[in-house]
Image (cartoon, rainbow, N blue to C red):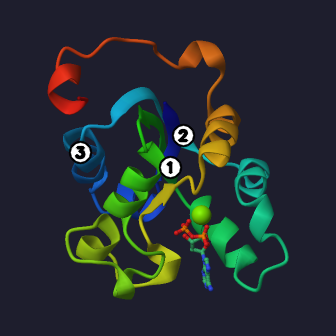
Amino acid sequence: MERTLILVKPDGVQRGLMGEIIGRFERRGLKLIGMKFLQMTPALAEEHYAVHKGRPFYDALVAYITSGPVVAMVWEGNDAIAAARSTIGATKPAEAAPGSIRGDFGMEIGRNLVHGSDSPENGMLEAAIYFSDDELVNWSRVTDSWIIE
Ligand code: DAT
Ligand code: MG
């Protein structure tokens, strides 16, 4: 079972799109196992975006992600990484498919509304940045047999 770390970024929160964005993952059939509302610190942002350190857009990226509160979530499912990334859409919103979050609500790469992990390994690593083991909930969902064959 894969896990993906999803963030509703500060623009999603400020624009009143939290419920809309969370609802898309919920309706897709991913299973929520952790959620918190937090203000990212520069230290947390640097840990999250360590792979981008040194890129020309890095400072703007850290400023953006720390500019206001975010919703951090862990969603679980078979192929959770690919499912979540298709629901999110391409990194550049102008290239994101209509029906995806970025394709429906975004215009620019620097305001692309959502983060989703890019591999099963990074899903586990990123989940551990935001959540301790006892903050992740092991629960059975009554609709599972209608979502998972
Ligand atoms: P994604 O968020 O789709 O996984 P990524 O991991 O390649 O994309 O990059 C992380 C974030 O960094 C991305 O959401 C927006 C920003 N970013 C990436 N490439 C960029 C670029 N060329 N110019 C400006 N911002 C960029
Ligand atoms: Mg990424």
The percent coordinates of residue 61 (x first, y second) are 65, 72
Give the SS element for disc 1.
Answer: strand
Q: Amino acid at mark 3?
A: Arg
- The label shown at residue 69 is 1
Q: Could you tell me which residue is drawn at 32 percent across and 37 percent down?
A: 30
Q: Which residue is mark 3?
A: 28
Quarter of the figure that contains the C terminus: top left
Is the residue under label 2 in contact with that under label 1 (CB below 8 Å)?
yes
**C-alpha distance separating marks 3 and 2:** 24 Å
Residue lying furthest right: 54
Q: Quadrant of ligand 2?
A: bottom right
Is residue 115 placed above or below 104 in the rendered structure? above
Dot 1 or dot 2: first in sequence order is 2
Task: Please state if 146 lies on the left or on the right of 53 as rendered.
Answer: left
The percent coordinates of residue 120 (x first, y second) are 60, 44
- The label shown at residue 38 is 2
